[in-house]
Image: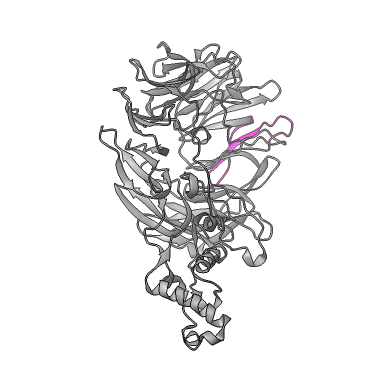
Amino acid sequence: MDELEKKEELELEQETPETEPIPEEIEIEEEAQAEEQPAEEEEALAASEKAAEPIPAEEKKAEKEGSNIVGIIVGLAVFIAVLAYCWMLPGGGSVQDTGVLYAKDNDLYFYDLKNDPYLLQEGISEGGSYHYFYTAWGASVAEEGHWAYFADDIDETGAFDLYRKDTKNASAETEQIDSNVYDYMTSKNGEVVAYLKEKDEAMELCTFDGTEVRSIADGIHLENEVYALSGDGKYLAFIDGYGMLNATVVEEGNALPLTDAAETYVMAEKSGILYFVARAAEGYNLYSYAFDGKEPVLVVENIYTMEMMPNGKDVLYCKTPDEPVLYRDIIVDDMAESDAALTEADGEAYEKKLQRDAIREAADNGEGFAPLLQECYVLTGGKSVLVADNVISAVGMEHDRPYVIGYKAKEFTPLRLSVLDGGLDMVEYIYYMSLSYGGVETFLADTAGNLEVLEGYKVQPDTMKIFADGKKAAYLTSDPNTGGNILMEMEIGKAAEAEAVAMDVENFAFVGGNLFYYYDYANGEGTLSMAGSETTILGACGVQFTDDAVYYVADADSTTGNGQLRYWAGKEETVIDENVFAFQYKGNGKLVYISSYDVNEGLGDLYYFDGKNARVLDTDVTAIFIY
């Protein structure tokens, strides 16, 4: 059996956590679908690698921080219900406390959360799409600065004029940066923007730092992940039209070619270091580049997957162990005595004994074969820390600390020689099959050497959420009878004592230190509750969990979709307003919302809630911009 056949024997029955796989023969299937298994095999390991050609750049999918693609709409994570046109937003995560951009009469308006809204630009579309229902794309406010960027005169192909405006000065002139733009991304403070514009049937990559436009390269393909700007706007990485990965110091405008063998790359938001994986003579190697003009640094050879941790500074990677799987570690010789008595006169029994002798000799000589399971490391502070072995797949957790979650094989039970019917090839085959049917565990690990196996049937690792202090966690498992979601809560360090909180849970989050959850979701509405509380709130939709409260629309009208906007922090509910259709949380207890929305006309009234009082900003509003 060759390596490809061995790897194809393993298939993950659970949904594998998303990761950034390295292509070709070592790629993991990111979203292997669950398959029905016989009862005795329900806990079987389902792990595998998919042999494939290298992933073309245009097929790679990843969101870029600060990116806005107009005309190429990837989609918005909202669920429009049949009963009520409410959106259900994911819980957790930080929210930008920045200004509000909204559209009205095909014009763009801005509200800085303090002063009156004002017209930012007229005629933002000339037939191109910038909104869907009450949400829109193509404009954003810098996460940490005071610059608003927006698309103007969007045409039918998605091309637009790119502008920016100093939001601290309402009377300041808007600046046109360039025209025929298709995509852009800004630094966190908004001082620098990188963008793609049309040139000679391809794209030109440019930057603008407030003083001048610099042409970095042309012949670029319009696709996701083709360029990345560091959070501080100092550095730029991009793939040119020939597949070469380049690095650029923005203020210098030079492009330094790094490699034409790059398969994937990520930019550390906080350090600005570029990490990339490149094909090597054997396998794939991980490199780092510090934009210092020196050669890239080889971090580790022969890796399997790589991704930037959500904390923006650490890198997670998996690699094949350097040491082989040794025959002596996986074989128990339970036939030494009986085999010693066999002679050639015993015929077939003697021939099988010779096969076992070959296995014994290989074991005694320290021989083995290539491992399939991986070792998982976190590159942190310039050092690689092993966090788990026997790993099938793993991803980084959404947390400031470097937590890793994933699947690993259960402890392997050595094979007895008496059950083997063949030579060394059969040993390898049965070893891999034993992994397949030996079971899989979902683990949570950190860089301090802690590893926990999570309790529950079919744990859903992509649902894991860890409280900010790192002391509590919650996740979803599956009900073996109904298939519904069960919410589990645990203390970090005591996974074996995880407790079931609720059934049929749709979403959940830690709010103010308590576990809130949303369950029994159907036809656009569900029920809210909190662990340890007897309070249940029926008919909630558009639910969004924040650090301090959960916001939602309740009792929405089945015809209009408008309902009562409320928030709840575990005690009494607080009503913000009536007749609300949808809202956008702005941080620190503030939000903007659309009231009296007419789904046929596509118009509503826009309000702003400052945590205490609500005020109307405008009427007949088309959409709020999502960024």
Residue 614 can be seen in this image: no
Report the coloring of the rendering: one colour
Q: Nearer the viewer, residue 73 or 203?
A: 203
Residue farthest to the bottom, as pictured: 341
Residue farthest to the right, as pictured: 559
Give the residue at x 32% y 40%: 288
Q: Where is 359 relative to 407, above or below?
A: below
Q: Position of residue 357 (x, y in %)?
A: 46, 77
Q: Is residue 114 magenta?
A: no
Q: Quadrant of residue 82?
A: top right
Residue 479 left/right relative to 25: right
Residue farthest to the front, as pictured: 345
Residue 449 left/right relative to 199: left
Q: Position of residue 308 (x, y in %)?
A: 41, 42
The number of callouts visible is: 0
Give the residue at x 71% y 23%: 600
Q: Where is 335 relative to 325, above or below?
A: below
Q: Where is 564 relative to 219, above or below?
A: below
Residue 509 left/right relative to 238: right
Q: Quadrant of residue 321?
A: bottom left
Q: Is residue 562 magenta?
A: yes
Q: Nearer the viewer, residue 539 or 330?
A: 330
Q: Position of residue 147 (x, y in %)?
A: 41, 21
The range drawn in magenta is 555-580
Q: Position of residue 58 (x, y in %)?
A: 51, 32
Q: Quadrant of residue 107?
A: top right
Residue 456 can be seen in this image: yes
